[in-house]
Image: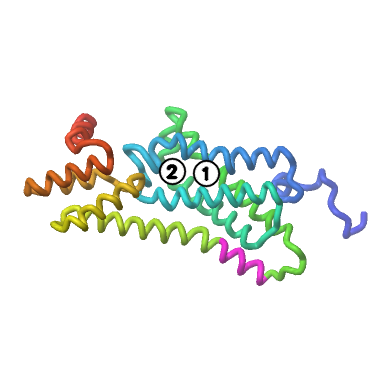
Amino acid sequence: MNANSPLPEKEIGFWERQFRLPATWPQVAFDLIFGVIAPVFCVLVDPIVFVGEIGLFRSWCLMAYLEIAVGIVALGYYLLTRHASSLLSGVLFAGAIFSLLLGILLLPCSFWGLIIIIGLFGFTPFLTGFVFMRNGCRCLEGLSPRVTRIAARRAVTLGIILTLLVPVGLQVTASHLIKRAIVALQSDSERDFVRAVLTLKWMRFTTDTDRIILVYQMTGDEKRRQRLTGAFQTITGQTIEERQAELKSRD
């Protein structure tokens, strides 16, 4: 056999086949299921990770949702077009990094959750991470020979940095605004108070509104307590008394 001839398909190892081009239909189906459908499903039925009473990472849900959205769009675009791009490859690699880190953080809950089956969803990020890693590698493999390694590495690095750091920056900014709004709820300025209520209402999904109850409990001024009661109901659609009763019933 000529030394330069390609290896027969039977001599290609399992893992090598997973990252080679062209992709097979079963691989494409797997990528669609665990790279697009499964993440969307997990977000919609999420009981404890980014939403819900427990909300393990609720304070980071804005960043997580942005990462998930960008990753799904990037993966979907690549699967549809097979357009090779160093920058797109970096975005896909960033999706792999995020998915694997999330899977590691969820491992304790995932093992405990196996008791009630739902913990199986906690292992989904590992499969999603594999999908993003595979397609990131394939996206690089399809680059034109005219693209130098240095240029490709720079673009990949830029894609990773932008995809990971921009959502983090937005999350940090949102968290800062929420903290300032909680403080402004205690202000005597009606203007600051109204702005704070609007800010917290718009950021309701990423705000721990129970912090308003804590401020309410620590406030002795009756007028301020009434304002906090109104603010809480405007933001959540629920009265402080109703929420306190819920919390007490869970103790």
Q: Kindly identify which residue carries mark 2.
A: 106
Magenta residues span: 150-159
Q: Which residue occupies 43% across, 47% down? A: 105
Q: Nearer the viewer, residue 246 or 93?
A: 246
What x and y, as percent, mark residue 125?
Answer: 52, 44
Residue 234's image quarter? top left
Q: Nearer the viewer, residue 30 or 171?
A: 171
Q: Is residue 100 visible?
A: no
Classed neighbour count for the residue bearing mark 2: other residues with Cα under 10 Å, few (<14), some (14–19), many (≥20) = some
Q: Which quarter of the rendered picture does the N terminus lie within?
A: bottom right
User: Residue at point 76% right, 69% down?
Assistant: 146
Find numbered disc 1 in the image and state the secondary structure of the residue it sits on: helix
Judged by its main secondary structure, the magenta piece is: helix
Question: x, y percentage for residue 172?
Answer: 37, 59
Q: Residue at x 42, y 33 (%)?
A: 113
Q: Which amino acid type is shown beneath numbered disc 2?
A: Leu
Q: Is residue 132 above or below residue 109?
A: below
Residue 126 locus on image (x, y percent): 54, 44
x and y percentages locating residue 251 in the rendered image: 21, 32
Comparing 211 with 20, the one in front is 211
Taking depth in this image into account, of 32 and 102 the one nearest to the observer is 32
Residue with the mark numbered 1: 125
Q: Residue furthest right?
A: 1
Labels in figure, total:
2
Amino acid identity at mark 1:
Pro
The answer to whether mark 2 and mark 1 are in CB contact below 8 A is: yes
Secondary structure at numbered mark 2: helix
